[in-house]
């Protein structure tokens, strides 16, 4: 009887652990998520700086997906559709005072994508 109870307990605990939300390892990157209003607001705020660094003006600047990394603040990796079949990949750091700074940016051409 005790062995059946132990087996049942192990099965229940395993099922609960599998259904729990995945928490990234400390310092690790989260899964890629669809961009939301907050991430798009970050992109719009940093768009002039991105355009200046890359020497381009983009017809669109819409966040598609992003990842986060908890550090002494928060890092974001954001993939942004920049129109005319271009993808901007940017990394942004948000410090503890809620100030955003662009730490990395590059443009990747997309092959005949229609968004």
Image: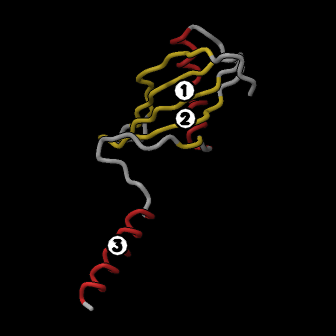
Q: Quadrant of residue 30?
A: top left
Judge by depth and name the residue closer to the eye, 93 or 82. 82
Tell me the tag on residue 13.
3
Image quarter hosting the C terminus: top right
Mark 2: secondary structure: helix
**Residue farthest toward the top in the current orientation of the protein:** 55
Q: Earlier in the sequence, mark 3 or mark 1?
A: 3
Q: In this rendering, is residue 91 above or below 94?
A: above
Q: Are marks 2 and 1 in contact (CB under 8 Å)?
A: yes
Real-space Cα distance between discs 2 and 3?
39 Å
Q: Quadrant of residue 58?
A: top right
Q: Are marks 2 and 3 in contact (CB under 8 Å)?
A: no
Image quarter hosting the N terminus: bottom left
Determine the residue positioned at 41% across, 69% down. Answer: 15
Q: Earlier in the sequence, mark 2 or mark 3?
A: 3
Tell me the tag on residue 85.
none
**Residue farthest toward the right in the current orientation of the protein:** 114
Q: Nearer the viewer, mark 2 or mark 3?
A: 3
Image coordinates of residue 18 in percent, x first then y, are 41, 62
**Residue farthest toward the left in the current orientation of the protein:** 2
Mark 2, residues whose alpha carbon is within 10 Å: few (<14), some, or many (≥20)?
some
Q: Which residue is mark 2?
A: 42
Mark 1: secondary structure: helix
Q: In this rendering, is residue 79 above or below 38?
A: above
| Count of numbered tags | 3
Q: In this rendering, is residue 46 above or below 107?
A: below
Q: Is residue 35 left or right of residue 9?
A: right
Image coordinates of residue 80 in percent, x first then y, are 59, 28
Q: In this rendering, is residue 4 above or below 14?
A: below
Tell me the tag on residue 46.
1
Determine the residue positioned at 52% across, 31% down. Answer: 78
């Amino acid at each position: 009887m005790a062995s059946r109870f132990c087996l049942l307990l192990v099965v229940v605990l395993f099922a609960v652990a599998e259904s729990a939300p995945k928490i990234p390892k400390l310092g690790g990157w989260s899964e890629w998520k669809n961009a939301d209003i907050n991430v798009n607001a970050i992109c719009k705020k940093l768009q002039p700086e991105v355009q200046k660094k890359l020497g381009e003006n983009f017809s669109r600047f819409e966040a598609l997906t992003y990842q986060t990394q908890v550090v002494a603040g928060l890092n974001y990796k954001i993939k942004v559709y920049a129109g005319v079949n271009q993808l901007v990949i940017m990394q942004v750091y948000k410090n503890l005072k809620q100030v955003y700074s662009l730490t990395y940016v590059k443009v990747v051409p997309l092959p005949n994508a229609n968004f």
